[in-house]
Amino acid sequence: MASDWPLWEIFIRGQYGLSHRHVGSLHAPDAEMAMLNARDVYTRRNEGVSIWVVKSADITASAPSRKGPMFDPSNDKTYRHPTFFDIPDDVGSM
Amino acid sequence: MFEFLLRMGDNTLVLGHRVSEWCGHAPVLEEDIALANIALDLIGQTRLWLGLAGEVEGQGRDADALAFRRDAWDFRNLLLVERPNRDFGHTLMRQFLFDLWHLDRLADLCRSADERVAGIAKKCVKEADYHLERSKDLIIRLGDGTDESHARMQAALEALWPYVGEMFTDDALDMEMADKGIAPLPSAQRARFGAALNGVLSQAMLTRPESDFARQGGRTGTHSEDLGHMLATMQFLQRAYPDARW
Amino acid sequence: MYAQEVKSTGRGVKTPEEMSAQERAFQARIDAGEKIEPKDWMPEGYRKTLIRQISQHAHSEVVGQLPEGNWITRAPTLERKAILLAKVQDEAGHGLYLYSAAETLGVSREELITDLLAGRAKYSSIFNYPTLTWADIGAVGWLVDGAAIVNQVALQRTSYGPYSRAMIRICKEESFHARQGFDIMMKMANGTAAQKAMAQDALNRLWWPALMMFGPPDAESVHSAQSMAWKIKVMTNDEGRQKFVDQTIPQIEYLGLEVPDCAARLNPETGHYSFTDPDWSEFFAVLKGNGPCNADRMRARNKAHDEGAWFREGLLAHAEKHQQAAE
């Protein structure tokens, strides 16, 4: 509908040192107002130190139907994980 | 000093009440939530100012006693803040004009010779800073939005303009506060306010009214009819059940 | 609850043999406790039922601002005013989170609100009752939010990811709501004779509508089975109601008030209270629009929306002008 403001996705950094995390969405006419609305809607309980707002339409998401080809191939590359390697205790921490 | 603190606390009390009247009735959910935040800040500020006022008075009245047990002629708020909400444009314009004055006033009070006043001002100034950012952004957008939003904002500005001058009028109490270093004279703010206002109005494509007529009386207790109605609502429970604790 | 009469597909639950391979795989994911996400394949019935339920829930939060908002300007102290305002503001926030969750299913908030304002959508019957005294603000927080939380805590486990995440956030925020209501009730019940009378009166009036919040008895609730299988609903109406009664009657006794249902008895063997059913004909009348405040609530929402149109359009027009200027 014509008078519906665009939808924005809101990402908030909860504490310094942490990544921004998706917390939800809201409507706003433009980016600046989306920022102010995000502050008012999603940080009412002291939840944030930094906010990102992204127009929902600007997000490209992976397709669930491509879940297999996208994510399964990394399943069997166990050598990428430190537990794959047996290092003798004598060597000390590594 | 007591009177000075009432002037600060009654402004936030009355405006906080007016803004809270919107809760559940704003044009869009995001705005409903934002307005409630502003009202909550103002109510919180009221508790600080009127709490200190009660202490200074030394007659055992706390912030609630001052808020709920005084009649209109004892209120010391600006006439501007008791103006009824009318349409959303009036509400936003009233907020913007107040915020523009309030932030500047609080910034001054952060340097008050009275540490208690400076302490309260330092807490409130951040809140006022955000309020102004929000109200200014909305004024600019609505002034430069549709023909209708422009017309409504211009009408609101004209309707509220006579209440602007009262913010910058000095009286004997102001002189005393200035002499003691507690608060600078209100008139000292006028030029800064004017310059900032012109900047926003030009971005908002709004025309500053030419009249310099300034309605007076709020700061000395002569209010509009609207305040009496507001207090009748606000004070109802405390008046009807004077023995009760809530 | 906040969605008391969600119409599902109308058909019963399909057996595995009746399902397509896709439907079977979908049901298997739900049975395994996996969350369904917006872009995943889902049966059309699942999507439609969810939209109805989440939007009814959202409408309830937004309309639910009105009865409590009725007392913001009359709150008796500055602290009570701030607490109530913060609480009613939270309801707006919860409405917003829920509309957002519904929007992930391919409807817009504007469409959903248009349905509400045209009287085509439902919201919880409880918000069509008036708040007549300050004690009602205590009773609404205590009973209505108390009832809601029973259901909402369970709904955190719902199968649809965005709905579940909204419920988790809502539950976290709501935890103070029922407490602030009970806090008001304690002050009133231990206050002057007039305050105590107000507290009892509020309890008497709101007890039955609070029981109705859980929806009709399971035996008459035709839409539950499919929703339970899909984990859109995770607790039956009767289970929720029983839990609410069991937790609330001891609280009434603590307050020193009379339980409005004189037949309510604790069964020492089961640990559950037996209680009288509310008047279901009243419940259906309220749902049909004949509650004490239906018309007023809708008038208030329509007025806010209509009178706010110029504001929403003004901001949008400004944004479009500036986007064009930037391009």
Image (cartoon, helix red, strand yellow):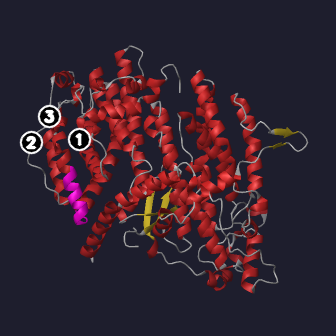
Any part of residue A15 in sight: no
Q: Earlier in the sequence, mark 1 or mark 2?
A: 1
Q: Is residue C39 left or right of residue C233?
A: left
Q: CA distance from mark 3 to mark 2?
A: 14 Å
Amino acid bearing label 2: Asp
Classify C112 as above or below B35.
Answer: below
Q: Nearer the viewer, residue B135 or A60?
A: B135
| Residue B48 in magenta stretch | no
Residue drawn at x 62%, y 84% is A66
Label 3 neighbour load within 10 Å: few <14, some 14-19, many 20+ = some
Question: In front here: C219 or C226?
Answer: C219
Residue B101: numbered disc? 1
Is B151 part of what is drawn in magenta?
yes
- Of residue C68 and residue A25, the one placed in the foreground of this image is C68
Residue B3 lies in what quarter of the image? top left
In the picture of the structure, the residue carrying the numbered disc 3 is B187
Secondary element under disc 1, as helix, strand or loop, is helix
Q: Which residue is mark 2?
A: B212
Q: Are marks 1 and 2 on the same chain?
A: yes
Disc 2 secondary structure class: loop
Q: Position of residue B88 (x, y in %)?
A: 31, 52
Q: Residue farthest to the top?
A: B59
The chain holding disc 1 is: B
Spot occupied by residue C101 in the image (x, y as percentages of width and height): 56, 65
Sequence-wise, which precedes: disc 3 or disc 2? 3
Q: CA distance from mark 3 to mark 1?
A: 11 Å
Could you tell me residue C284's position as x and y percent? 65, 57
